[in-house]
Structure formats: structure tokens, C-alpha cells
């Protein structure tokens, strides 16, 4: 697509799939709203993931199991309204692709109608029917293996996956099955780098790592983690590129201080009436105050 100011970027799922083995790793970051999507797009990320991490990152839940397809469609819509050139991937939440094939396809379609160019779902061999049904509806699918937060109870907590040989083998087999089924990319979350490397060497679609080391075809981080919204200890795979939480707190504290000290707003930050009108408004104000005082005195008499 070409605009008056030059070529407009439009990243698609096939374009991401074609980046397999390319010298330029795929860059994916989460966003849940329009201003964040604008920032990510201007920064040139390839993929904006509207992750179900919105649950714990933004909505205050303890895990991702609490968000619904309505929640996800709401946030995908907000991101899509920023009209990013990056590919928008909508996360299918827990139970939106586990119950029936028709529900699965309908839920994936909701995210596409909200503005996603692809959907992501968690799991391997067990989810192949869901993957195939969504692909059959012409919707590109991104896989997600390793630590799959929607399985937190089944996994016994949020912990690194694939440390033992059997687990590692299962992750590699699942990745091969997802790629074979037609997923255009696969997220690998919290797996040892040796496992991520083997998966990356095995499958012919890009792997996008988070806590999976450097041997992936791309990397993803949660926007709020990489900006340092929270100054509590982050997982070891998070690199903070800013301290937005601290900066925001300082800014709001300075605002509060200015308000309490009578320094905000200044005359420049205030609308003024035309010359002479302010005085007249003052006279009307005094007249009105006098009338209401008289009326009050009359009521009490
Ligand atoms: O929901 C999310 O943010 C994710 C990423 C961690 C990959 O799935």
C-alpha cells in the first residue's frame, strides 16, 4: 500500500512466516490499548500481541484464566483502532477454544472482526483440532508452547518447562505438530535455551521466545515489563529499558505538590475572558451573591 507520505507498512502473517531463518529477528510486544499500539507501531515492532496477559498486567487479576472472549475482543478493538502497520495478533482466552469446534471458530472470528490479523492459542497435540478448524476458516494461527499460563493449575504453577528429557521431547514434538498443521509462528515461553534451539532448528516457521534464550527467530516481551511499570523484582528474562513506574509516580507527586502549593494552574494554563468582560462578570457575580443572601434572609425571617 502506498500513501501520500510514502509506503505504508502492512505486516501480515505470511510475511512473518517468511522471516524463518532470516537475519532479522521478529520483534513482538504486547499492547492492550490504542495509545500503546501507536507507540509500538512508531517504534517499528513487527507484531503487536493483544495478550491475555491483559488479565494480570492491566485488569488486576492473579492469572490469565479470568479474561473472556468479550474482554479480548474489547482490547483487540482498541489496538486495531490505532490502525497499526504491525500485525495484530489476538490471544484466544482460556475456554474459548476448548469446548467445541464451532465455538472455537466463532471466537477466533470475533477477534478477527475486532481487528486481529491472526490469533494465538496455547498448547500442542491436544489443540491440533482447534488449530485446524481455525485455519480452515482462513484465520492464521500462532502457537504457544512451554510455560502456557492458561494451564497454570495443570502445570502446578508458573515454572520453566522442558528441563527434563521427556518434557523437552514433548515440546519439540508439539512444535513440529503445530508447524505441520499450519501455524505461521510459535511462541516458546520459559524453556531452556537448548530446547528452544532444537525447536527452532526443527520447525520451518519462526519461533518467538520469551524466557527461551537467544536461539529463536524472534523475541517477545510484555510492554509493561520492558518499560518498568512495576519496580518489584521481574523474572530473569525481562530487560527493563525504562523506569516508567518511578517516572510516573514522580510526575504525579509533583502535580499534587503544585496543586497543594497553589502553583497550578498558572495564568498561562487558564482561559481568560475578553478585556473588560472579567470585571463585568465579577459585578454580576456580586449581584447574584447579594440576591441569594437577601432571599435566604427572607426565608429565615
Ligand atoms: O499473553 C501474553 O502476553 C503472552 C506472551 C507472554 C507471549 O502470551
Image: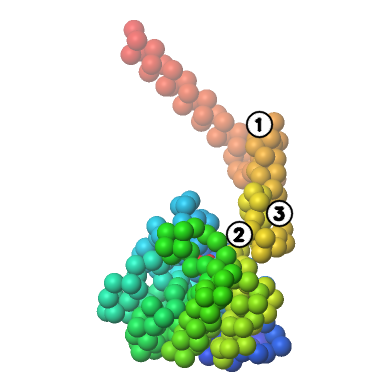
Q: Is ligand 1 closer than 8 angstroms to the Cβ of mark 3?
A: no
| Quadrant hosting residue 26 | bottom right
Residue at the far front in the pictured view: 165
| Quadrant hosting residue 268 | top right
Question: Considering the numbered disc 2 on the image, is that residue within a helix, a strand or a loop?
Answer: helix
Which residue shows up at 58% across the image and 83% down it? 199
Q: Which residue is mark 1?
A: 260
* Quarter occupied by the C terminus: top left
Question: Considering the numbered disc 1 on the image, is that residue within a helix, a strand or a loop?
Answer: helix
- Gap between marks 1 and 3, in whole Å? 26 Å
Residue at the far top in the pictured view: 301
- Gap between marks 1 and 2, in whole Å? 30 Å
Which residue shows up at 33% across the image and 13% down it? 299
Q: In this orientation, which residue lies closer to the viewer: 274 or 170?
A: 170
Q: Which numbered dot is residue 243?
A: 3
Q: Are marks 1 and 2 in contact (CB under 8 Å)?
A: no
* Mark 1 or mark 3, earlier in chain: 3
| Quadrant hosting residue 160 | bottom right
Which residue shows up at 63% across the image and 51% down it? 230
Q: Residues within 10 Å of mark 1 (few under 14, many from 20)?
A: few
Percent x, y of residue 294: 41, 16
Amino acid at each position: 500500500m502506498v500513501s501520500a507520505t510514502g509506503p505504508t507498512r502492512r505486516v501480515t502473517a505470511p510475511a512473518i512466516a517468511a522471516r524463518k531463518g532470516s537475519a532479522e529477528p521478529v520483534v513482538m510486544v504486547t499492547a492492550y490499548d490504542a495509545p500503546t499500539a501507536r507507540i509500538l507501531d512508531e517504534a517499528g515492532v513487527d507484531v503487536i500481541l493483544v495478550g491475555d496477559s491483559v488479565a494480570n498486567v492491566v485488569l488486576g487479576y492473579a492469572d490469565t484464566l479470568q479474561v473472556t472472549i468479550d474482554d479480548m475482543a474489547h482490547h483487540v478493538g482498541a489496538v486495531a483502532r490505532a490502525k497499526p502497520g504491525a500485525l495484530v495478533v489476538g490471544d484466544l482466552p482460556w475456554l474459548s477454544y476448548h469446548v467445541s469446534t464451532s465455538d472455537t471458530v466463532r471466537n477466533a472470528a470475533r477477534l478477527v472482526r475486532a481487528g486481529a490479523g491472526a490469533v494465538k492459542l496455547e498448547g500442542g497435540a491436544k489443540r491440533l483440532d482447534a488449530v485446524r478448524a481455525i485455519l480452515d476458516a482462513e484465520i492464521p494461527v500462532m502457537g504457544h508452547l512451554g510455560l502456557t499460563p492458561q494451564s497454570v493449575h495443570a502445570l502446578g504453577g508458573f515454572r520453566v518447562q522442558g528441563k527434563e528429557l521427556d518434557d523437552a521431547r514433548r515440546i519439540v514434538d508439539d512444535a513440529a505438530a503445530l508447524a505441520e498443521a499450519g501455524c505461521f509462528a510459535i511462541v516458546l515461553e520459559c524453556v531452556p535455551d537448548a530446547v528452544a534451539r532444537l525447536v527452532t532448528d526443527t520447525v520451518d516457521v519462526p519461533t518467538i521466545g520469551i524466557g527461551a534464550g537467544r536461539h529463536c527467530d524472534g523475541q517477545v516481551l510484555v510492554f509493561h515489563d520492558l518499560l518498568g511499570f512495576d519496580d518489584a523484582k521481574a523474572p530473569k528474562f525481562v530487560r527493563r529499558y525504562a523506569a516508567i513506574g518511578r517516572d510516573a509516580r514522580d510526575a504525579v507527586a509533583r502535580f499534587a505538590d503544585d496543586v497543594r502549593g497553589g502553583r497550578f494552574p498558572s495564568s498561562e494554563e487558564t482561559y481568560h475572558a475578553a478585556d473588560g468582560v472579567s470585571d463585568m462578570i465579577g459585578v454580576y457575580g456580586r449581584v447574584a451573591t447579594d440576591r441569594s443572601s437577601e432571599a435566604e434572609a427572607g426565608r429565615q425571617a
